[in-house]
Amino acid sequence: MIEDTETIDEFLVRHSADVEEAVRKAAAAEIMPRFRQLGAHEVDQKSGPHDLVTDADRNAELYLTRALGALLPGSVVVGEEAVHANPATYEAIQGDAPVWIVDPVDGTRQFVHGDDGFCTLVALVRHGVLLASWTYAPARDQLATAVRGGGAFLEGERLFAGPPEPGRDLRVATSHPDYTNDEQKRALLGVWTDGVAPRACGSAGLEYLAIARGELDATAFCWEAAWDHAAGLLLVEEAGGAHLTLGGGPFRVTGGNSLPFTAARDAATARRVAGLLSGVGSDPR
């Protein structure tokens, strides 16, 4: 619990391990017992057949909302499922209080189909600044963490994204066709060019982790939902990577971004992909 005179930085020094424990416990209690055990009554659609929610999503978010709020009194939680129930909840990201941004199961479709490519995402944000993040893939028992100015780590090992290998096609994960409209598909056409090897993304959180590990070169995403991006963007930044919108600046979790946007292993790659997405034309290698 934060003390009256404690800063957020001091809170993170004292309680990062407690946040990690809460994330692991939420997954152990509410997600993993349902992995490959879901009944039909535990899966619902939200906006359509590709937009799924399960009892694991809802219950894990409730668990984290209680646990994180208790750790940091005065903070608020903005979770994907709470915002779906009440869109006005999203406005807390714009406020003065510290905000926990939570995606209880990022990659719900993978989770429903028994694929281990899903994760739980938590980020701590204040005044739009990403301060810390936790990316936990419970079926793989992998936890990645980042603190602003303190580096990115996977199971305690420092992550360095590094630049892509010269001369090799850029590996770029793009917004999945099932989740994009015709206008967004047209906006992503720029990466379908020589020198780039695009593919549809899976869990956004795990794609960001792949960039931080140097296993993926960049993303090209069309949507702004903060719970999908906040944790991963800080992970990429702290591993030495960068992110860039078509407006020329970094992605803002508070919204109002020019889309699509990219996150990449280094600044040069981010500029290269952003140039392709903006329709500049030539591949500026």
Image (cartoon, rainbow, N blue to C red):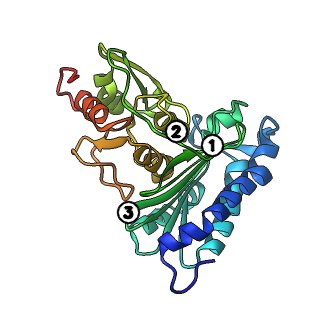
Residue at image mark 3: 128
Q: Quadrant of the C terminus?
A: top left
Foreground residue among 270 and 41: 270
| Foreground label between 2 and 3 | 2
Judge left or right: residue 64 versus residue 89.
right
Residue at image mark 2: 209
Q: Residue at x 49, y 28 (%)?
A: 215
Foreground residue among 139 and 156: 156
Kindly report the distance in space between the C-alpha atoms of the residues bearing marks 1 and 3.
23 Å
Residue at image mark 1: 119
- Residue type, label 2: Leu
Q: Are marks 1 and 2 in contact (CB under 8 Å)?
A: yes
Judge left or right: residue 108 versus residue 239.
right
Kindly state the secondary structure of the residue where label 3 is placed: loop
Q: Image height check: is 91 above or below 159?
A: below
Residue 82's spot in the image, x, y percent? 58, 60
- Residue type, label 1: Cys
Judge left or right: residue 282 versus residue 34.
left
Kindly report the distance in space between the C-alpha atoms of the residues bearing marks 1 and 2.
11 Å
- Residue type, label 3: Gly
Q: Which comes sooner in the sequence, label 1 or label 3?
A: 1
Q: Quadrant of the N terminus?
A: bottom right
